[in-house]
Image: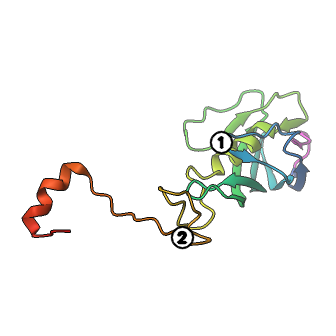
Amino acid sequence: MKIEFDKDSEDGSQTLKQEESPETLQLCAEGASFGEPVKVDLSVSKIGNQLICRGNVKTSAQLECSRCLAIYDQPIISNLDFVVDFGENPQEFKSEEDNYFIADPFADFFEIDNLVREIVILALPLKPLCSEDCKGLCPICGTDLNKSQCSCVKKEVDPRWEKLKGLLGDKS
């Protein structure tokens, strides 16, 4: 994906809608597979020798739930905000929070594949869950507790607490 610009134009404003396959973007993350294209909607405004770019990235990833191990689709929608400076003497930019890139002053486009790939990977959840109320798997028999209940007895007491059990008068 790239943003094409005309440095001599006063009004470099444009709206870009681009779509790329995950393979073209070399999009890969452990535990995730990407089956649908990555869509980028971007509004680009030219101010002096800078392009101010704002938009979003949309795609979907297939992830494995960390509780029940089911495969599910996770929609990914993330903001994309950055500045491209293509002037011959780019100004110093002190903020570490903003995305600020220096482009070749003789180029007429700016490649955003790496930025889009980074945005998508950072939008993946650290602990993927198929739903907030996922019950997970039974630790004894492995039954998916979202689909059925198991008959396992789950009353396991940590042996370190066994001596305290008598203090409360619990004889069970």
Res 89 quadrant in image: top right
Could you say which is closer to the camera, residue 105 or residue 38?
A: 38
Asked whether residue 77 is drawn in magenta, I would say no
Q: Position of residue 126 (x, y in %)?
A: 56, 49
Q: Which residue is mark 2?
A: 133
CB under 8 Å between discs 2 and 1: no
Q: Amino acid at mark 1?
A: Asn
Q: Quadrant of the N terminus?
A: top right
Q: Amino acid at mark 2?
A: Asp
Q: Which residue is mark 1?
A: 99
Tell me which numbered mark, 2 or 1, is placed earlier along the sequence: 1
Could you say which is closer to the camera, residue 92 or residue 162?
A: 162
Secondary structure state at the residue bearing disc 1: loop
Residue depicted at 71% across the width and 35% down the height: 101
- Residues in magenta? 1-10
Q: Position of residue 28 (x, y in %)?
A: 75, 39
Answer yes or no: is residue 12 visible: yes
For the stretch drawn in magenta, the main secondary structure is loop
Secondary structure state at the residue bearing disc 2: loop
Res 36 quadrant in image: bottom right
Instruction: Using residue 116 as the reference point, say whether residue 13 is left or right of it.
Output: right
Q: Position of residue 85 (x, y in %)?
A: 74, 37
Query: For the residues marked 2 and 1, what is the alpha-carbon distance in whole angstroms?
Result: 36 Å
Mark 1: give few (<14), some (14-19) or many (20+) Cα within 10 Å: some
Seen as rendered, the residue at the extreme left is: 167
